[in-house]
Amino acid sequence: MARWSSPKDSPLEAALRRNRRWIVNNQIKRLLLRFPSRSAPVRLLQSRFKTLDLLGRAANWLRKYPSCFDIFTGDGPSGSGGELCFGFTKRMAELVDAEEAAVAASEPAMADRLARVLMLARGRRLQVSKLAALRGPLGLPDDYLLRVLPAHTDLFRLANPYPHRRNAAELELLRWVPSLAVSAVEAAASTTNSLPRFTCSLPSSWVKSHEKMEDFNSTPYISPYSEDWAVPSTDAEAEKRAVAVVHEFLSLTMWRKISVMKLEHFRWEFGLPEDIGRLLLRHPCLFYVSNRYKLHTVVLREGYDVSELRVKDPVVAAKDRLGELMQEGLHEYNQRRRAANLENKRRIGDVDVKKEEEEPEDEAARLDSAEKREERRRFYKVLFGDDHQ
């Protein structure tokens, strides 16, 4: 796929940066939750460090977040001897429990969300192996099948149409649910007793984009939910339906975003065009495409107010509190490290710390700028001779 993206939107980029920041620690959290004691050897984390795209020592990473992780030896924090282990701090454990409670309370909403995704799909079924890629965006825990299926046997069924194939199990929706077959666009229109239409979330100064959206809305809205699933016959209708499907799918995600690569994995199931990237870029009023971290991500613009989600699911709010604790721990670590570095410099006499700390910032900046100007003048004098002005 070519390197393409939307014109940079700084607030949305900030939202993506904030969400991305804690992925590694969330994976470490999930690793600890697999152990009944919620503790594990540091060597186990070290063995998986490369899969987390990290280098260095795992213990050093854990020490960067003292408010989140405890490092100890033996079988517990009070143990003596034994190998190095790590676990949650008390505050982190409380927030993890709060997140687990939020996930448990959201199981009915989780089932509805899963049913809607299956209603978008061809044949109202999706491979379980493919659904695994949507666990994060849809807010599904690792054991979502064990949570949802036993309580909704009338709605979902696991089927294996190809027993001789590996990972061929499919999750099937057993019946159509009319009350769920209402898209976010249709729900918004019902509140104002108007016809369903897309809304442009760009500033009014984007005149051409607003005009294109008005033209796009001149034809009737095509619902992404259809009991008799079929791709429209004309190109215009196919594009209208494809935009509606992507818009609705993003509305179902927890953070109103997903990687374009994951979306492409469901191109056949959702009846999307082969070049999804161009489809997204043709509709900047609705979608923002970022290439941050060299990973293309599509964001639903109307899902955000500047850089904050307009509507936060309770699970998202719980995860945000975890993120705040991680940020607090990182800040504490950086402060301690900075203080230790200054103390070392003072001890070996490399810098007069007291004088450095008392020097006014604006005066220091002025002197630094003057030194740089003098350095540049001398450089050009040597390079070009006395004729350079």
Image (tube, rainbow, N blue to C red):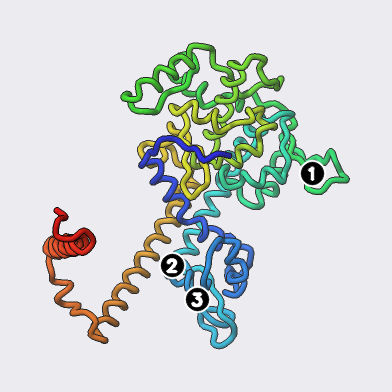
What residue is drawn where x is 57% and y is 47%? 136
Question: In the drawing, does residue 162 fall left or right of residue 314?
Answer: right
Q: Circle 3 sits on which residue?
A: 71
Who comes first in sequence, dot 3 or dot 1?
3
Number of the label disc, if any, that sits on residue 91: none
Rendered location of residue 2, percent (x, y): 55, 39
**Kind of residue at disc 1:** Ala
Q: For mark 3, give the secondary structure.
A: strand
Question: In this orientation, which residue lies closer to the viewer: 108 or 180?
Answer: 180
**Quadrant of the image occupied by residue 239:** top right
Secondary structure at badge 1 equals loop
Q: Please identify the quadrant where the N terminus is shown.
A: top right
Residue at the spot of label 1: 168
Mark-to-mark CA distance, 2 and 1: 40 Å
What amino acid type should be assigned to the residue bearing mark 3?
Ile
Q: Residues within 10 Å of mark 2 (few under 14, many from 20)?
A: many
Instruction: Answer with left or right where residue 70 lies relative to residue 171.
Output: left
Q: Indicate which disc, 2 or 1, sits on the residue closer to the N terminus.
A: 2
The answer to which of 381 and 165 lies nearer the viewer is 381
Image quadrant in which you'd find residue 388: bottom left
Q: Earlier in the sequence, mark 3 or mark 2?
A: 2
Between 253 and 314, the residue placed more toward the observer is 253
Please name the residue that numbered disc 2 is placed on: 65
Q: 211 above or below 169?
A: above
